[in-house]
Image (cartoon, rainbow, N blue to C red):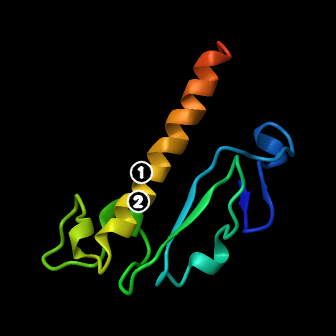
């Protein structure tokens, strides 16, 4: 899959050169990689930035840097745990919506 913030496509060898959809992009405000990610949200490819002074790469999954390391992650270590929880809920909401659309259409989307 070719991915940049402006052009996201499935390569020709994996089913053609078609536009991908239903991808969720999340970035921490302090993540140096966020500029290589999609920054502007769209209905089929939402993009969220978790804003806090120590929200780095992977904050949506594991929380913010912590010592000792907690593999499960802990959003309480972020300067704004509510910002992490809000983005996590938005991810769940999008996934629930897309799965319900798939079920309503009577298709197997997995």
Which is nearer the eye, 50 or 20? Answer: 50
The residue sitting at the top extreme is 106
Q: Is residue 58 above or below residue 93?
A: below
Is 31 displayed left or right of 18 in the figure?
A: left
Q: Secondary structure at mark 2?
A: helix
Is 24 displayed left or right of 55 in the figure?
A: right
Quarter holding the C terminus is top right
Q: Pinpoint residue 64: horizontal percent, then vertical percent.
A: 30, 75
Q: Which residue is mark 1?
A: 89
- Tell me which corner region of the image, top left, top right, bottom left or bottom right, holds residue 15: top right
Identify which residue is drawn at 46% across, 84% down: 30
Identify which residue is drawn at 50% across, 35% down: 96
Identify which residue is drawn at 29% across, 70% down: 81
Q: Secondary structure at mark 1?
A: helix
Identify which residue is drawn at 15% across, 80% down: 67
Asked whether the viewer can see residue 48, the reply is yes
Q: Which residue is mark 2?
A: 86
Q: Is residue 80 above or below residue 93?
A: below
The answer to the question of whether label 2 and label 1 lie on touching residues, with beta carbons closer than 8 A, is yes
Q: Pinpoint residue 68: horizontal percent, then vertical percent.
A: 12, 76
Asked whether the viewer can see residue 110, the reply is no
Q: Pinpoint residue 1: horizontal percent, then vertical percent.
A: 71, 53
């Amino acid at each position: 899959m070719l991915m940049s913030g402006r052009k996201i496509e499935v390569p020709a060898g994996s089913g053609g050169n078609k536009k991908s959809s239903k991808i969720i992009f999340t970035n921490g405000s302090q993540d140096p990689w966020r500029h290589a990610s999609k920054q502007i949200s769209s209905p089929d490819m939402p993009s969220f930035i978790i804003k806090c002074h120590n929200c780095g790469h992977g904050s949506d999954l594991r929380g913010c840097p912590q010592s000792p390391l907690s593999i499960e992650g802990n959003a309480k270590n972020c300067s704004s745990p509510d910002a992490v929880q809000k983005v996590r809920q938005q991810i769940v909401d999008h996934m629930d919506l897309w799965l319900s659309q798939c079920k309503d259409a009577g298709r197997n989307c997995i």
